[in-house]
Amino acid sequence: MHRLFRPSLFLLTATCLAAPAVAQQTPPQPQTPPTQGWPANKPPAAATPPAATPPAAGAPAAPPAQAATPPAIPLPHWFVEIDVNKKGEITRADFLKYRMKSFEQLDGNKDNKLSLEEFLKVTEPPLTPDVPNLPPLEERKARARAEFQNLDTNRDGFVERGEAEALVHSEFNNYDTDRDNKVTEPEVRLIVQRSLQRDAQERQQAEARRRQGLMTLNEFIDMQMRSADQLDKNNDGKINQAEYLVMAGPADGPQAKNLLPFDLRKQIALRKFAEIDTNKDGQLDRVELTAYALKQFLEIDGNKDRFLSEDEFKKAQDAEAAKVRALIQTLQPAQPAQPRPAQPRGGQPAPAPAPAPGLAPGLPQGTR
């Protein structure tokens, strides 16, 4: 179980602006998602067998129990759909034709290449069915744009048929282990089995890491999104400046005591808002929030092991606090130099001046 404080997408800024201390909280444990692509066909856990009852006198002995046969590794749906004649194998040509169907659907003007506008249609029905828990359309389009850049290998702004076919051939090669230009059921089942085993191993490793108090990227992003959702008061899926300025803290009242002036806190909060708002539309959407969470994760992950430790969080929080203090020095007006008090007669030092009102004892200027 995590012992880390619950990180917020805006935690480091909020800590410096509007919170004298950050309480450590135990984040909820997310459930492990099912294996993507094919169902995880694990045999059910064996139940405790009942105690054996001795046979009655003269009755024949019961035959010994047969060991349960483990279920076969399932075939992916694409293999079943291509192998309509149930031959147990598919050719490279059949695989290419099947995989290029989506290219044909997207290529509206039939010029054998896809523009970005055509390619983005892959995020909408019928190519992407409207199912429960589907990511928002803008998030799907952002991922599609990234995929478009990967497919456009010659960087001419189009995904040509040859570029798309190269990806399909590469996928076929992953299954064609004997390189005979055919994929058989045993080959596919072997690759699926290895994939399931690899996924299971990764889940076990992630669970072991979690037990050590470490946090994965998916957990970090999920927590950041939940924190962002709390700021989204009108539930439109975006955060505007007014909603974000809650992070600056109260303008006045008892809760604003010992904090920086509200105008200064507001300026710092708006600078952070502008840093996250990459498209400069005055709103933070889920794509921008996710991208910023990823950026934060990579920066906090000092040892690049793809997990965040409590020590890494502490170092990142200290670094952010130092940056905010430096920013405060640039935003605050320069204070005129105070004349040095005259030394009184008798050699006794002059009494120390009283601390400035509104600062906690022991803290230097500009830290709160």
Image (spheres, rainbow, N blue to C red):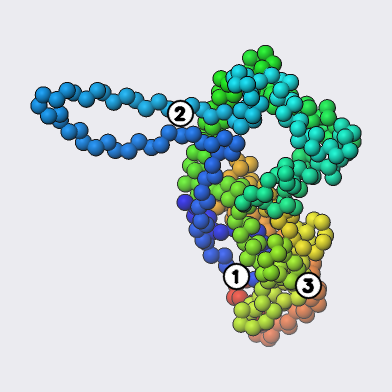
SS for callout 2: loop
Mark 3 Cα-neighbour bin, 10 Å: few <14, some 14–19, many ≥20:
few
Residue 322: quadrant of the picture = bottom right
Q: Amino acid at mark 2?
A: Pro
| Separation of residues labelled 2 and 1 (CA atoms) | 58 Å
The answer to whether residue 302 is seen in the rendering is yes
Q: Position of residue 344 (x, y in %)?
A: 69, 85
Q: Position of residue 181 (x, y in %)?
A: 69, 16
Looking at the image, which is closer to me, 235 or 9?
235
* Disc 3 and disc 1 in contact, CB within 8 angstroms: no
Q: Amino acid at mark 1?
A: Pro
Q: Which residue is mark 2?
A: 71
Q: Which residue is mark 1?
A: 20
Left or right for 271, reference 223: right
Image quadrant in which the C terminus is located: bottom right
Q: Amino acid at mark 3?
A: Gln
Q: Nearer the viewer, mark 2 or mark 3?
A: 2
Query: In the image, is residue 81 above or below residue 297?
Result: above
Q: How many marks?
A: 3
Q: Which residue is mark 3?
A: 332
| Separation of residues labelled 3 and 1 (CA atoms) | 20 Å
